[in-house]
Image (cartoon, rainbow, N blue to C red):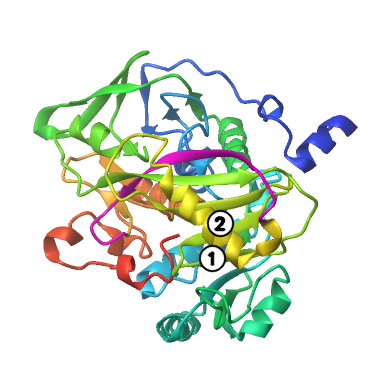
Amino acid sequence: MQRFSALALIRHAFGGHRSWRPQWRAAEPKAAYDAVIVGGGGHGLATAYYLATEFGISNVAVLEKGWIGGGNTGRNTTIIRSNYLFDESAALYDHAVKLWEGLSQALNYNVMFSQRGVMMLAHNVHDQQSLQRHIHANRLNGVDNEWLSARQAKAFCPPLNIEKSMRYPVTGAALQRRGGVARHDAVAWGYARAADAMGVDIIENCAVTAIRRGVGGAVEAVETTRGTIETRKIGVVAAGNTSTVMAMADLRMPLESYPLQALVSEPVKPIFPCVVMSNTIHAYISQSDKGELVIGAGTDAYVSYTQRGALHVPMHTLEAICELFPIFRRLRMLRNWGGIVDVTPDRSPIIGKTPVAGLYVNCGWGTGGFKATPGSGHLFAWTLAKDEPHPINAPFRLDRFRDGYLIDEAAAAAVAH
């Protein structure tokens, strides 16, 4: 068990500053590795960690073009849940929730996972029917979910406005009590530290410039800004940049990239007890351990690689939040930001092999990536190690778009996040 000073424990408990993040080796790339992971976000680091701990493959390099956790991992709104409609999705996300529940202990690092509950609001008859359909489907799959009346929803979340005079009055809610939040960058740091301790090389400021293929078309190396690295297995986990990386191997991916925006308020004392989401007005809100209200919006309506997005999107979201929670109207916005999400035609991820031997891909999570982090990494590690999918990620193969076996959570999800 690692020992901490009193000051370090305080910083550890309350999240701290980026300069207080745990340290890992500033590794220099070796000439060859058993596997190379492209992307040093939560999914990529989790993949490397599980390759080492579950399959004994520690001669692994994680290549990150910027800094660890500097992409979508550090730009999300931290929501964790598994109340998806389809059997395949429920199994995938609930696998992740089960890993979340023991993650701090497994990594020996506090990822601040808090199962405070995720409540999805209904505003009309259609919402009620849709959410109750989700509840029944979830229960059949062993996933917790329950229906609350409007009064029960307010009892669970006192700041919620349930007055019938609202534009979109609250008529009820679906509650997954096992859902919650975690600290986004702490997850990346925890996986990075644990993977580093297992011998994985984490190489920052190392962009991939080419994927080299040999006899028969199989991968044999990656070209990077820090030299050539030989490997027979490449796992691409580069949210927002997947299409660019895969094009280096002459593969065109069924992906579109959209800006996704979020913001935080000035910090206040603890006042918000859970996560609340609304699909009808498309807004969601929780409170961080630092006191900020974390508020998210939907994806912008146009494809783009910008990490800024259109101004009207967060403004419309704030209007909705202030109507749902009038007590927050006088708060000031502290900062807002945008991330880039890769979206597939059916809004479900791709986790598996590609037509190129030795090349694997984990992408297309859209707005569901953070909640899946441990499950995604665990399943992708299985696929790389065994050269075959785990039963849970087998339905999320790339060729489902050719064969028509879609998992259309775009229309089925109670909310896109």
Q: Residue at x 25, y 46 (%)?
A: 256
Viewer-closest of 283 and 168:
168
The answer to whether residue 80 is visible is no
In the rendered structure, which disc, 2 or 1, sits on the residue that comes first in sequence?
Answer: 2
Q: Which amino acid type is shown beneath numbered disc 1?
A: Met
Q: Secondary structure at mark 1?
A: strand
Part of the protein shown in magenta: 329-347
Q: Residue at x 42, y 84 (%)?
A: 133
Q: Which amino acid type is shown beneath numbered disc 2?
A: Ile
- The residue indicated by pointer 1 is 277
Q: Secondary structure at mark 2?
A: strand
Q: On residue 317, which mark appears?
A: none
In the rendered view, tell whether residue 389 sits above or below residue 212: below
- The residue indicated by pointer 2 is 79
Q: Residues within 10 Å of mark 1 (few under 14, many from 20)?
A: many
Cβ atoms under marks 2 and 1 closer than 8 Å:
yes
In the rendered view, tell whether residue 280 sits above or below residue 289: below
Query: Residue 332 lies in magenta, yes or no?
Result: yes
Describe residue 413's horizontal placement relative to residue 400 as left or right. Answer: right
Residue 196 lies, in percent from the top left, at 57, 30
Query: Residue 116 lies in magenta, yes or no?
Result: no
